[in-house]
Amino acid sequence: MQQSGILILNSGSTSLKFALYQLINAELNVIATGAFTGMPNNANLKIKAPTGQILTDLTFTAQDNVNHEVALSKLLPLLHEQFPDLNIAYAGHRIVLGGEKYTQAIKLDAESLAYLEDLSKIEPTHQAYEVMGARALAKIFPEIKQSATFDTSFHRTMPAVAEFYPVPATITAQGVRHWGFHGISYSYINRQIAKIIPTAKRVIVAHLGGGASLCAMLNGQSIDTSMQFGAITGLPMATRSGDFPADAVFYLLKQCNYTAESLEAELEKHSGLLGASLGISDDMRTLEQSDDLHAQQALAYFDYAVLKYIGAYTAALEGLDTLVFTAGIGENDAQFRARICTKLAWLGIQLNPEANLTAVGCAQAHKISQESSKVAVYVIPTNEELMIALNIAELYNLVPNSNN
């Protein structure tokens, strides 16, 4: 008897990441993950089992011209070959921007794809490729039911004072507003908080990885988040500047030192930890192991920005009862968490050093604060792919009460 399969896709300009879930007895279990990388001219496909075992490792040449359509036409048969008892009937896409129209996950059709593609002018880095992946799948496997989960949806509960800028309506009408991102991760963490810490009311979640942001949640709803109109703003990140003054942008453009495109590239690809360390590294682990003054300055800048946002969001929430760390740095860097929690002693945070170390790399949530701490501090691993799969289960009524 065939089991239902759900394919989760994250389409990029040169990559196609995926996770395959099997629905058994109303439970979602991941059975394979992987990615095409180096598209279109030097594409490589790896399919891995949940244990990390490589099931497939294929390399393609420029003659193969592996675009999204070609990639999917090769991937689906390989997955069917690996898992013959699985009927991949559903596919879910991560799409960055849902715009004003979509504030929750949706079933995709021609009308919604056209709307989402038009939003690429607001978010050109990811949006167009994510829509491209959905169109490609619809063309070659039209029988697969498709849906989209949006990074911006979770933040549509922000109050107007946080969502809109004090600018003329002519600017707002162009789609300029505080959209907020990492919403799929925050949505997943919010569900975990509801189960693990049901009394939590005033919460700050720190999603810290190559891309980094913080979110202030009041009673399970986003009221503010550090990424704003696009993915450059907010915290400094691996290679993204974070907050950078608009008047400095105008100054640099007026001096003819940069075009709009070249300045955007500087702020997006050559700034953040990489820029602050003067090119030493964009990786926290490398910087923490370095004695170089510039590496230490980059770490100090990142820590300071995180602390500033936590302070601001504590004020916006009118208090704080729970702080959550998640994503690559948040889940795996005990040294960073200790630095931040030490600086937040004024909030009554008391770190449990042993629990902080134990939490590194764990698949389950860990409380890392002392019982006497006035603010509970947790490390909760995020799972954006599972969140998208859960959205599909809800959209198509595959799993009753799938709020897990």
Image (cartoon, helix red, strand yellow):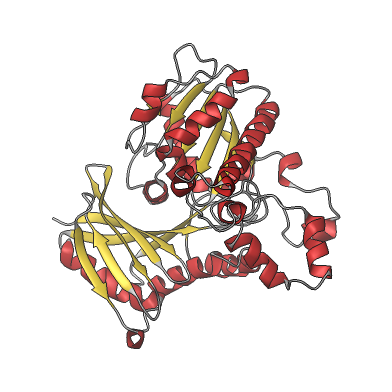
Q: Position of residue 324 (x, y in %)?
A: 49, 31
Q: Is residue 244 above or below residue 74?
A: above
Residue 172: image quadrant is bottom right
**Which residue occupies the foreground of this view, 60 or 387?**
60
Image height of 199 relative to 38, above or below: above
Q: Which quarter of the image is occupied by the C terminus?
A: top left
From where the camera sits, is residue 190 visible? no
Is residue 214 positioned above or below 370 on the image?
A: below
Measuring from the top left, give residue 188's x and y in whole percent. Answer: 45, 40
In this picture, residue 255 sits left or right of residue 330: right
Task: Give percent across and percent down for residue 359.
Answer: 36, 31
Above-or-below relation of 211 to 361: below
Q: Is residue 47 left or right of residue 62?
A: left
381, 157: nearer the viewer: 381
Measuring 27% from the left and 69% from the top, which residue is drawn there?
76
Image quadrant containing the N terminus:
bottom left
